Each structure stands twice: as C-alpha cells, then as structure tokens.
Image: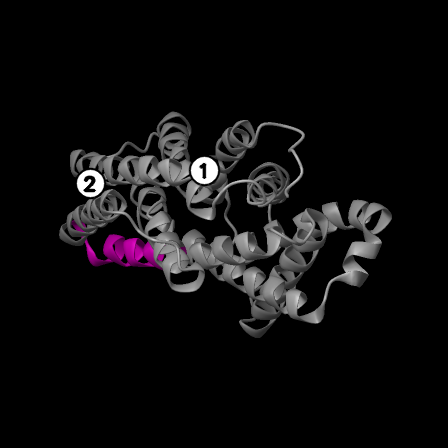
Amino acid sequence: MREKPIINPYLAVLVGVFAISFSALFVRLSTAPAIIIATYRLLFTFLLLTPFTLLKNRQDLLDLPWRERGLAAASGACLALHFVTWFTSLSYTSIASSVVIVTIQPVFVVLGSWLFFRERISRRAMFGMVLALTGSLIIGASDFQLNMKAFWGDLLALAAAVLVSGYLLIGRRMRSTVSLPAYTFYTYGSSAILLVIASLVSQTPFYPYPTNDWILFVCLALICTILGHTVFNWVLRYVQASVVSVSVLGEPLGAIIWASVFLHEYPTERQLFGAGFIFAGLFLFTRASVNKQ
C-alpha cells in the first residue's frame, strides 16, 4: 500500500505546471545553442540536488539494483533528447506552435501505457486522441504554408513529445518502488552526462556566454526542472502517468501568455484553431483517465 502523500498531489501538479510554463520563454531569451541550454539546465539541476541526496539518501543510491539504474539512465536519455529537440524547435517555429504540439504527449503516453502496462484505452480517450492529433495537423499545415522552417520546427516539437512520453512512462514504472532522490539522481545525472558528451562531440563551446544566459540557465534548473519536472516525478508515485501528462495542458497556455507579454509574440488564428482541437481532445482524454481511477 502506498503511503499517504504529505501534500495533495493535484496541488503539486499545479505548481509544476506553473513552473514549467516559463521554459519556452527562458529558452527563447537565451542566446546559447539549444544543446548548451539543455546541458546546463540538467547539469545545474543535478549539482543543486546532489548534496542533499548524498547527505540524506545515500543508502537509497547504493541499494538501487543495476537494472533500475539502467532504466533511470534510459529515462535520462529520453529527457536529454526531449530538451534538445524541443529547444531546437523554438529556433524554427513560434512558441505557440512548439509548446502546443509538445503538449500532445498524452497521446503517446496512452499508447505506451497500452503497449507496456496493458492499460485499456476507452472509446472516449481514443476520440480525444484523434481530436488532439487533428489539432497538431492543423497547426503543422498552417506553418507549412508559412514556410518550411516553421514546419520543421513543428516536426521537432512532435519528436520532443514522443521523447518526453518515454521519460514519463519509465518514471511511472520506477516511482512505484524507487525513492524520488534515487530516481532523480540517476535520471538527471545520466541526462547531464549524455548532454556534456554530446556537446563535446559536436564541439559546441561551453563558454563564454553573456551573464543573462547564465541567469537563464539557473532559472531553468531551479524553476522549470526542480519545481517542475521533479515535482512531477514525485507525483508519479500517486497518480497515473497519463494524468500527469495531460495536466501539463496548462503549460502552453502559460507559455503563450508569457510570450505575448514579454516577447510580443502572439498566436495566429489558425494556431488558436488547432490549439482548440488539441485542448478539447486532451480534455476528453483527461476525463476518461480520471474516471478509470
């Protein structure tokens, strides 16, 4: 039997959604390459959490079986690739298109849950998935008419949605038995190491960057990862991965607001039309998921 959470998991999800809604804005404000932004985001997160983990949960790290460490490394690889593809997409397409398409991740979480956990998919959930996919196609078609650069950004955002779904599915599998500090230590650690190696191989410079970029790197680590992703990892012990995934529906809403306020980047009518399909589809899917619990 799972222990009673110290705070309401759904309240924690709201905190996480608010925190990650700043991600796209911080990335767009940075002048660094996407792979470097991702590298420092995960590296700073790992360095900030490690002292507390080693002091209070060292035994959890030592007791974790190698198989579980391998799964955490796979989760970290998915997270690293998700950040690189998504951050890169923001260089090609608008924040509105990118974050809305990334939000389609519940579709892939559901499919993965069916494939790996044998969870049934209701007709309502299936219909919601079709609506969400239709919305992403509308946005993609709109950007394709605009130019190939924007369309390529949409494809990268879609790839990022698939990758973060893998991260969530593995997290759900592990968080039922593995403590949060042990899981985040190996997941964030492997993700940071992979990104550092990729940066070295691609010969992307680690410095110099303006002071503003370093502030943004820290904000991505503290706000978007520790208060965002880490909170989601904690919540995964108490709710289904699909519910957490659909809850991040609030991220694009927040991201579009921040982009409008700080960057004066406003969504087009077609983007809003496609987003409407996605939000409606994911709302139906959310209801179907909650009713299963």
Does residue 33 appear in the picture of this structure?
Answer: no
Between 292 and 143, the residue placed more toward the observer is 292
Callout 2: helix, strand or loop? helix
Q: Main SS of the magenta segment? A: helix
The residue to which callout 2 is attached is 274
**At 57% from the left edge and 74% from the top edge, which residue is drawn?**
201
The answer for how far apart the CA atoms under marks 1 and 2 are is 21 Å
Extreme front residue here?
1
- From the viewer's perspective, is 106 left or right of 125? right
Q: Residues within 10 Å of mark 1 (few under 14, many from 20)?
A: many
Q: Is residue 192 above or below residue 94?
A: below
**Residue 113 in the image: x percent, y percent?**
41, 56
Q: Is residue 187 above or below residue 15?
A: below
Name the N-terminal-most of marks 1 and 2: 1
The residue to which callout 1 is attached is 25
Q: Is residue 150 above or below residue 275?
A: below
Q: Please report the bounds of the magenta region as a residue range.
A: 146-160
Between 243 and 96, the residue placed more toward the observer is 243
Callout 1: helix, strand or loop? helix
Quadrant in which the C terminus appears: top left
